[in-house]
Image (tube, rainbow, N blue to C red):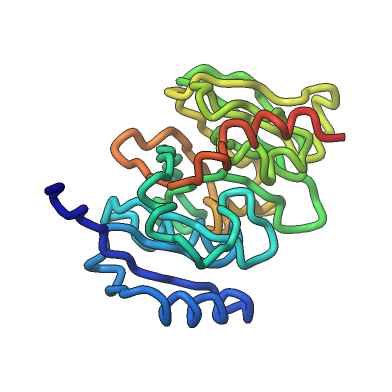
Amino acid sequence: MNAPVSLPTIAFVASSADAAQHALAELQRQYVSVSPEHAEVIVALGGDGFMLETLHRFIGRGVPIFGMHRGTVGFLMNHFEPAGLVERIAKAVSVELTPLIMRVETMEGRHFEARAINEVSLLRETRQTAHLRITIDDVVRIEELMCDGIIVATPAGSTAYNLSAHGPVVPLSAEVLCLTPISAFRPRRWRGAILPRNAVVRFEVQDPIKRPVSAVADFTEVRDVRWVEVEEDTGVAFTLLFDPDHDLEERVLKEQFVS
């Protein structure tokens, strides 16, 4: 006789959206579940924003997360189908994402750290443009960029805010980061850069009192920054699970051909 298959313990988490809450109730009726702290797999119900929240929430656990789309944008989510969930999880393909780490000093001299799965963005706080000095691996590459802001995006985040700012879409397997300006005024023709994944990017805010700037790592915002450093956090990895026919690498590739 074949030995019985050991099924993973599953936890369900959901956004506050009605569709996600209804899906949560339906799945909890059909499947035995445990708390997220004791689960071997977490099923997240919502959109991409909720998926990012879930990844950040359980960053210390290292458990894989299987998302199902019950929100607005579902790029990181599988389709919602209650039937056969355990079998889908067993057959799922895993994708590992490495986040960025953002280190910040504020005008008050306070220091903060935050991680970003999609991107770190610097944004002007007032009507006046931000003036930024950009240093890559201790080499000043732009003495003064006048802009609304700038983005450092991971390959996974290249299809998000980075794409909206006309940055490049890059494959998940590409070992690069996207550096994309937001409404650059000077140098007007600069459209950004592709950097090696191990690059250390430093931004220094010029005239921060008159032209204050905030820094945002996914959804963690620090206002009135003096300088910001961004690099890949190689000590952390997130694992997402996808249906075999929901190839995230293929979806990223397709984004390059969408008109």
Q: Quadrant of residue 209?
A: bottom right
| Residue for point 77% across, 43% down | 164
| Residue for point 57% across, 49% down | 76
Quadrant in which the C terminus appears: top right
Say which of 28 and 11 sits in front: 28
Whole-percent x, y for residue 155 in the image: 56, 32
- Identify whether 55 is placed above or below 240: below
Say which of 18 and 138 sits in front: 18
Image mark count: 0
Is residue 112 in view from this perspective? no
In the image, taking residue 121 as reference, residue 88 lies left or right, namely left
- Identify whether 182 is placed above or below 124: above
In the image, taking residue 90 as reference, residue 82 lies left or right, namely right
In the image, taking residue 209 as reference, residue 220 lies left or right, namely left
| Residue for point 51% across, 32% down | 202
Whole-percent x, y for residue 79 in the image: 60, 56
In the image, taking residue 142 as reference, residue 36 lies left or right, namely left
Whole-percent x, y for residue 236 in the image: 32, 41
